[in-house]
Image (tube, rainbow, N blue to C red):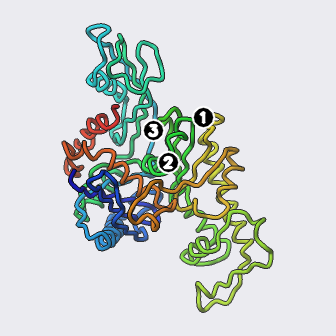
Amino acid sequence: MQERVIVGIDVGTTKICVLVGELDRDGKLNIVGVGTCPSQGLRRGVVVNIEETVTSIAAALDRAERLSGKKITSAYVGIAGSHISSENSKGFVAISPKNRDIEQNDISRAFEVARAIAIPANRELIHVIPRGYVVDGQEGIKNPIGMSGFRLEVEAHIITGSVSSMHNLIKCVHKTHVEIEDLVLEPLASGDAVLEEGETDLGVVLVDIGGGTTDVAVYTDGAIWHTVVLPVGGNLITSDIAIGLRLPVGVAEELKITYGHCDPSTIDEDDMIDLSQFMPDCDDLVPRKLLAEIIQARVEEILSIVHEEIKKSGYDGLLPAGIVITGGTAELPGILELSGQILDLPARIGSPLGLHGLADSINRPAYSTAVGLLLWGLSNTSLLMEEDEPVDIENENNLVSRFGRWLKAFIP
């Protein structure tokens, strides 16, 4: 097997992260390059300024190329934002001649029926993901190929996004002279990076709290059953600190990262933060307990919104594996305990699993999405080498034609 470079670009609201992975001859993915840059031009996961976003992506790409020694020409790109929506659908097909063995073509036909939902002109298909199959009323089938039957049903999770938001993101990446191998919903990528197989079988909710958005994905029976992108994230915590303590936003962010905590009860009343370390001309002191109280209030609100979303999904009480918190905000001390209290579920912090190469530098929740993009690329490598073409922003139909590739990637 020839060595192959796989690149993931996480275009986040607060930072751009580029990871470069090299697939060696043994099939192992080694992280050989990392590039990060503060984001400009994005709000809540959506591009609001093309020029600023392009500059940010280009800077992160340059750093990743310098560290890896690789020229980046294509990448898997994460997509998020409150414009994302999802729904579940079913597709039924008859097996003809009757009671013959089910073939891959039958599955493809069932998927075509499942995806034939009414999608408005201003929305575009991102993913069609199988949740399970039913053959002649028998449920819980993971791979129907080779089984005999009269009727095949597929249950699918369909994810769409705003055409304008998707195309603006694609345009920004293309302006850096990088072609897109695939657009990947960020909570799916994060799930690939941090969830264990036993958790997705039992029932688990992934909560990826980024800077501008919080991604929620519910898994059960080994498949994804519900996804949503909420327009709340760590930037609101920073804003609260800036307003509450009357500080510049940049200083508020540094305070959050350096001294932040989600549980004021663990902090002494006389524990003070000297602001001169952030602002040389300022000699004010800030009670660290007050900082924690501000953070706790906003994190509680974010987690409460997540809890309501889980209830709306219908899976509240059906997630014995609990909640996995990831994303940059998951690095706040005390958030694990607070999550367990608010959501009334067992909780753990999700960091990327099974990394090689520059693992120490990215084995943190903040890098979960970027690592997941590499894993997504790894799982599709053989397919992509055979027939994939990058997304062409000049041809909108190419966004639709990717459905065939996704389908082949997901069919057992």
Indicate which disc, 1 or 3, sits on the residue closer to the N terminus. Answer: 3
What residue does disc 2 label?
229
Tag 1: amino acid: Tyr
Amino acid of disc 2: Val
Can you give x and y, in whole percent of width and height, for residue 222 in the image? 49, 35
Q: Nearer the viewer, residue 27 or 169?
A: 27
Residue at x 71% of width, y 84% of height = 285
Q: Is residue 135 left or right of residue 406?
A: right
Q: In the displayed structure, does residue 139 sit left or right of residue 2?
A: right
**Residue under label 3:** 86
Q: How many marks?
A: 3
Give how far across and how far down residue 375 sits, in percent: 37, 50
Q: Is residue 288 above or below residue 293?
A: below
Judged from the image, the secondary structure of the residue bearing numbered disc 2 is strand
The relative height of residue 240 versus residue 315 in the rendered view (above or below) is below
- Counting residues from the start of the chain, the first of labels 2 and 3 encountered is 3
CA separation in Å, label 1 and label 3: 16 Å
Q: 5 or 277, which lies in front?
A: 5
Which label belongs to residue 382?
A: none
Q: Which comes before the other along the chain, label 1 or label 2?
A: 2
Q: Residue at x 70, y 68 (%)?
A: 292
Q: Quadrant of residue 388?
A: top left
Question: In the depicted view, which residue is nearer to us: 273 or 358?
Answer: 358
Q: Callout 3: helix, strand or loop?
A: strand
* Residue labelled with disc 1: 315
**In the displayed structure image, the side of residue 212 where residue 29 appears, left or right:** left
Label 1 to label 2, Cα distance in Å?
17 Å
Callout 3, which amino acid?
Answer: Ser
How far across and down, in percent of the image, does residue 348 sit?
61, 52
Which type of secondary structure does the marked residue at label 1 adopt? Answer: loop
Across and down, in percent, residue 271 comes to 75, 78
Mark 2 surroundings: few (<14), some (14-19) or many (≥20) residues within 10 A: many
